[in-house]
Each structure stands twice: as C-alpha cells, then as structure tokens.
Amino acid sequence: RENGGTGVMVKTGSVPVLQECTIEGNAGVGIWFAHESYGMVDRCEVVSNSTNIMLEGFSGPTIKDSSILLGKDGGIMVTRGAKGTIRECLVQNNKPYGIAIGDGANPVVFLNRVFDNSPYGVLVMAEGVGHIYANKIRRCQLAPIVLAASARTVVADNQIDPTNNGVHCCWADEEQRVRPVELVQLQRLAIG
C-alpha cells in the first residue's frame, strides 16, 4: 500500500493467486503481470494506483469479481500480446479509460460493469484483438467504446448507455480522428 513504485509485480512463469486483498495508492502500476506470467486476482480492490492493473508480454491471468477503481492513468491495460480473462468486475472512475486493449493483446472481457470512466469506457487501440461481450457500460464521458481502425475486436451483446452527446461507440480512423458509429453499424456490432 502506498509505495513509490509497483504494488505487486508478477514475473515470468509466476502463477500467484491474490484473493480478498487491497492494492492501493501506488505511484506505479497496482498489479503488473509481466512477460508470460499467469495467476488470478479474485475479489480484490485495486484502487488509486497510476494504472491499476497491467497485463503485458503474453501474460494470461484471470481477473474476476474485483473492483478496479480510480486509476489515475487507467483502469486495466492489456497490451503486447497479453491474453487473460477479465470477468464480473466493477471498473469505475478510472481516467482516461476503464479497460484498454492494444498491440496484439487478445483478452476475453465479459460480464463486467464499466461505469463512470473518463473519457472512455473501453478503448481498443491499434492492433487490439479480443472479445468484449455481455458487459454493462455506462456514464462514460465521451464514448463507452472506441475502436481503432486496425482493431480486430469482437464486440457483442453489451448493454451500453449512450453518453450525453448520444454516442454509443466510435471508430478512430488512420489519422486518429474519432467518429461516432452510425445506427446501422451498431446493429452489425450487436450493440443497442
């Protein structure tokens, strides 16, 4: 709790089970799953860290039934080929995203409550893959879901409340201009 760096660092080949713990107030990442690490975060509170949870380098943990709150530089970042499962979590009040996926990451994200993240609920960056389904995504400042032009993510059967500006989902084109997705495109995505 409240150290100058990373709260919990899970290194290559490690398979820890973190249960019913609080990881809070670290200047760096709260829980960091590094290259080819696995394990589980179960019924934990990960609160007010720089980035609350980071999965990278082909790691593949399960994060379940946990609260991921008030991340200063993000809620959960999945990048650099990481896989993993994020399920049945409350991801709330993180900035600038609740969950971000990029750089060949391929997680399964389902049955989560992604609320009040600013400005984005779920941000799928360049080369992000994965499956995002059956989540409740609400009260995000600019867009509940943003998909980069090169994202190859399956987004289906989510309950999404539009933002105050009426946006459900956005595409980011090759020039990084974000544009709202039209109703016909939403139906193809199985949103709304």
Image (tube, rainbow, N blue to C red):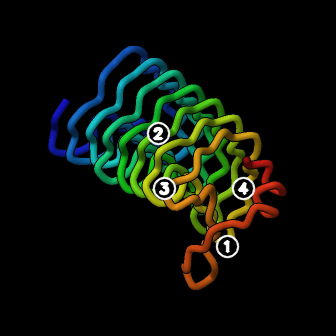
Q: Which residue is mark 2?
A: 115
> As shown in the figure, which amino acid type bears the numbered disc 1?
Ala
| Tag 1 secondary structure | loop
Q: Residue furthest bottom?
A: 175
Give the label, 1 or 3, closer to the camera.
Answer: 3
Q: Which residue is mark 3?
A: 164
CA neighbours of label 2 inside 10 A, class few (<14), some (14 to 19), many (20+): many
| Rendered location of residue 116, percent (x, y) | 42, 43
| Rendered location of residue 45, percent (x, y) | 36, 25
Q: Which residue is mark 1?
A: 149
| Tag 3 secondary structure | loop
Q: CA distance from mark 4 to mark 3?
A: 25 Å
Lower sequence index among marks 3 and 2: 2
Name the mark on residue 37. Answer: none
- The residue at the point 57 percent across, 59 percent down is 166
Horizontal relation, residue 28 to residue 80: left or right:
left
| Tag 2 secondary structure | strand
Q: Is residue 101 above or below residue 1?
A: below
**Hey, which quadrant is residue 131 in on the image?**
top right
> As shown in the figure, which amino acid type bears the numbered disc 3?
Asn
Horizontal relation, residue 106 to residue 163: left or right:
right
Lower sequence index among marks 4 and 3: 4
- The residue at the point 72 percent across, 55 percent down is 153
